[in-house]
Amino acid sequence: MSTRTLFAPRRLHKSLPQKLRDLNWLVLLALVALGGVGVAMLYSVGGASFDPWAKRHAIRFAVALLILVAIALVDIRTWLRLAYPAYLGALILLAAVEVIGVVGMGGQRWLDLGFMRLQPSEPMKIALVMALARYYHGLNAWQSSRLLHLFVPLLLIALPMILIARQPDLGTAVMLALGGVTVMFLGGAPKWLFIGGTVAGAAAVPVVWGVLHDYQKARILTFLDPEHDPLGAGYQIIQSKIALGSGGLFGKGFLAGTQSHLNFLPEMKTDFIFTVLGEEFGIIGGLAVIVLYLVPLFYGLYVAITCRNQFGRLLAAGLSFTIFLYVFINIAMVMGLVPVVGVPLPLISYGGSAMLTIMISFGLILSVAQHRKIAIPRNA
Amino acid sequence: MSGEQSRFRTFSRRAALLAGAQGLAATILGGRLYYLGVIEADRYETLAEDNRISIRLLAPARGEILDRFGARLATNRRDYRVFLIPEQARDMRGTLERLGRVITLDEGDLARIKRQISRQRAFLPVTVAEGLDWRDFARVNVEALRLPGVLPDAGLTRHYPLGPSVSQVVGYVGAPAADDLDGDPLLGLPGFKVGKRGIERAFDDALRGEAGTRQIEVNAYGRPLRELSRDEGKPGDNILLTLDGALQEAIASRLGEESAAVVVMDVVSGDIYAQVSTPSYDPNSFTRGISRENWQALLRDPRKPLLDKSLNGQYPPGSTVKMVVALAALHEGVISSDTTVHCTGEYRLGDNLWHCWKKGGHGRIALVDAIAQSCDVYFYRAAQELGIERLAAWAHRFGLGETYGIEIGGESAGLVPTPGWKLATSGRPWVGGETLNVGIGQGALLATPLQLAVMTARIANGGRQVVPHLVRQVGARPRPAPADWPDLGLARGHLAAIHRGMEKVLEYRGTAHASRLEVDGMRMAGKTGTAQVRRITKAQRDQEVEQSDLPWRERHHAWFVAYAPSNRPRYALSVLIEHGGGGSSAAAPVAHDVMEMVLRRDPARRPVAGSDRVADRGDGSTGGAR
């Protein structure tokens, strides 16, 4: 087979200590730093107290870090084999939540597993990227660009998207779809699909508007003009902008944010935690955190580009982009650039499921990095 | 080219595109952050401070109103009260019901509260109850924790220790009305009161003081967390009056429910020691907001408790004006001190006959006795020979038809009629008989009790145009009083004759002999006055109808004006008893009692409060030994 001749098989199996040594410690450091920022901000939000949030955040982060390293050490081919089963499992969970799920705030549903509350949309975020990467791994360039081979990826995206949208959690559904479409794009799906899709999407806006829930419409209207209803729907965004703006260049100082400590901010420990950070540490703090995100995320893209197998490339790039999307949407939201959607800030916002998703994703990216020299046949 | 290579190339190209998009997105975030935190920082900083800091006004303590010796006429009392902010109360009925279990709220209270809620904006507090005792207040405080919008407050309310006896001068306070709003933010404070009448109104600016401010840090729910800074503001100035509160109160109780007025003043300095008008009203009932029924009752009362009769009651002065007629006639050379007139009880002018009050007349009578016995015929003649124009000019010199700029304002000017005035108002010419009427203080001539007190003071002090005043000092600033009043330049002999006449009023055969007064060798001199309300018919005159047989509204007004001590005059007073019947029977006894109190208290010679100076002893001529 041509692949085998061009990419000569080499002894690429590394010992465990070697694998540990080869982990990108700068990326890990950046992740630990982000987790630490999360602990610090939750300490502040908790009223200068480790209880109830900062401590649990720290413990969860430590556990998640161990899981991350463990995942990074597992051979990429194992993940390749597990891609479809993982997707199937996540899909079953999503379906199950339809039947036996508990409704939480804002329409998000979870499954009570006894030891933790699981939002099945979280594992699906990873599983969808894995499944799509797996699918495109099995296609050659010609096949990828064929219309016939759009069917499976679109179905893979549509099924969970519909289930999540029914919860209803439109924001997560759209984010999931965006991540999936990104993998399709990178996998080599025809260009016209994306150009046409954008045009069709724009054309569909009035239709979509018609089926949106009132609160969803309100959010979009509020985004377009937050001052329209300063005490109602626009309140969150206005207060958030006030907090960020009044923080200035260097911030008001740790634990000294007036907007946050006097409760003018909404959802401080989750969606609006970046605002607390911006108020207390200023633009400098905000930019530092953005840079902290860019380190592992651009590393993910770098890994993808230098990877020798299509699965690894798509997995690393797809996960990086998905996480970036979360970071961007959250920060853009609190600064009033996009409508309020319930998207937490990765690794900093309080919340176990979301943190685990992010850490597993980085674990997979690091696994790709570990094994990027391995060429994997299309039909492995 | 292998498939793998092609796949890789597509991937790399598209991944680079994505990386670029990410870079762009990150730049947008950074740019937005810069926009908010640097370019717009000032605006948002202000907004954040506005969020955090709530500025609350502190009501300054209202200045007190004190009498000349420092006794409190209007003061502030700690008051426990409850406000309700309708906007914050989720369930208005439930809230009031629960409050009603702690403090008593009757139907009237509830109606008033509901009316107020419907009338004003929802964020403005409504007074639920005032004047709570400490126990009730403590219970409301406990309850308020569970009732949003309920605001217990310990503030100051106005209190008038002397009640009705000073209300006409001191006035009262009330909630600001629309035309009281002068831009002072204090007026928006819950329970803030402004002066509505009297000194309270005239000196409202000085009494009010300046608002203090309190900067409080609040959280998003508006709950105060800590005080950032505090500026106590400036408490209102105290106002020191010339009144003697105790004297004022004693006079008020002497007058009782009589519809009457008394003014006591200093003939040298112009200080008003007492200015009483009865019946009066309790200013304390206005502080909390008077009920509709009580207000209606005050308005309907025929004795007009809301009217300050000392300043605004205008009556014909009757015979009290005779000294002015006499002094004018003496000064103008129309008569001399020795001029006698033969009084037959009648005086003929043209075809008309004018009667003296004494049937049968006084016989031949000279000036001093004409005053002492109030012979009308003597003054018909004097007035006629003097002529109305000269008479009117002299009346003005003695303060009739004039206002003096009394500090509480709103004095009535009375009326000194002249031919010009009559032509202008009725279009008809003056007739000679009217001059005769004015000569005995009847006809169109009108004066207020204050004017007659001033007139008496100017006679008593030797013809100096003393001006009365009520306020000694505002805050630390004493009100300037001119040391020398303009002198009318009256001859000593003329004055002596008038003074003698007034002394003889209280001696044997005088019209007020029964009310003669001597305290420690000090005697009172005075003059009676009886002002007709209705024209006396011939039938009545013939039948000698007793005043007490007439309905109250038709009886004569009774006057008495007096000064004392007669040898060195210091105090002048006027007494009016509305529909009292006669000056000698109704007014003179009151004047006797009042002057006795004045002489015993002798307020002019006691040290005043509020300054280092001892009482103004005047120009020295009256300060000698007695």
Image (cartoon, coloured by chain):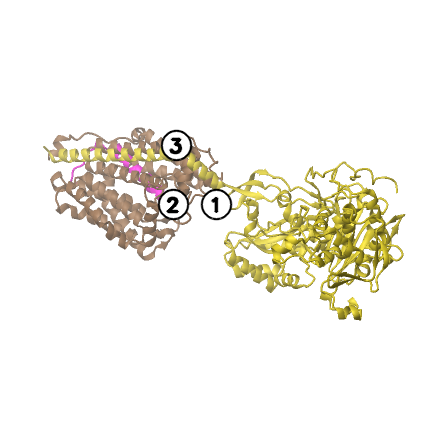
> Where residue B212 appears, x then y in whole percent?
59, 40
Of discs 3 and 2, which sits in the foreground? 2
- Is disc 2 placed on a helix, strand or loop? helix
Picture disc at residue A227: 2
The amino acid beneath tag 2 is: Glu
> What is the CA distance from the residue labelled 1 to the residue labelled 2?
18 Å
Spot occupied by residue A362 in the image (x, y as percentages of width and height): 31, 37
State whether discs 1 and 2 lie on one chain: no
- Between circles 1 and 2, the one closer to the viewer is 2
User: Relative to B368, is B236 on the left or the right?
Assistant: left
Which span is picked out in magenta? A351-379
| Quarter residue A35 falls in | top left
Q: Using the rendered image of the protein, determine whether residue A112 is visible from the camera's viewpoint.
A: no
Q: Locate residue B533: give its quadrant.
A: bottom right
Q: Residues within 10 Å of mark 3 (few under 14, many from 20)?
A: many
Rendered location of residue A235, percent (x, y): 41, 46
Q: Which colour is chain A painted?
A: brown
Q: In the image, A300: left or right of B69?
A: left
Q: Does residue B563 appear in the picture of this structure?
A: yes
Which amino acid, mark 3? Val
Report the Cα–Cα distance between label 3 and label 1: 25 Å
Which residue matches tag 1? B220
- Most common secondary structure along the magenta stretch: helix
- Residue that badge 3 annotates: B38
Mark 2 falls within which chain? A
Q: Which chain is painted in yellow?
A: B
Instruction: Say if B153 sits above or below B377 in the image.
Output: above
Q: CA distance from mark 3 to mark 2?
A: 21 Å
First-in-chain label (3 vs 1): 3
Residue B553 within the segment the image draws in magenta: no
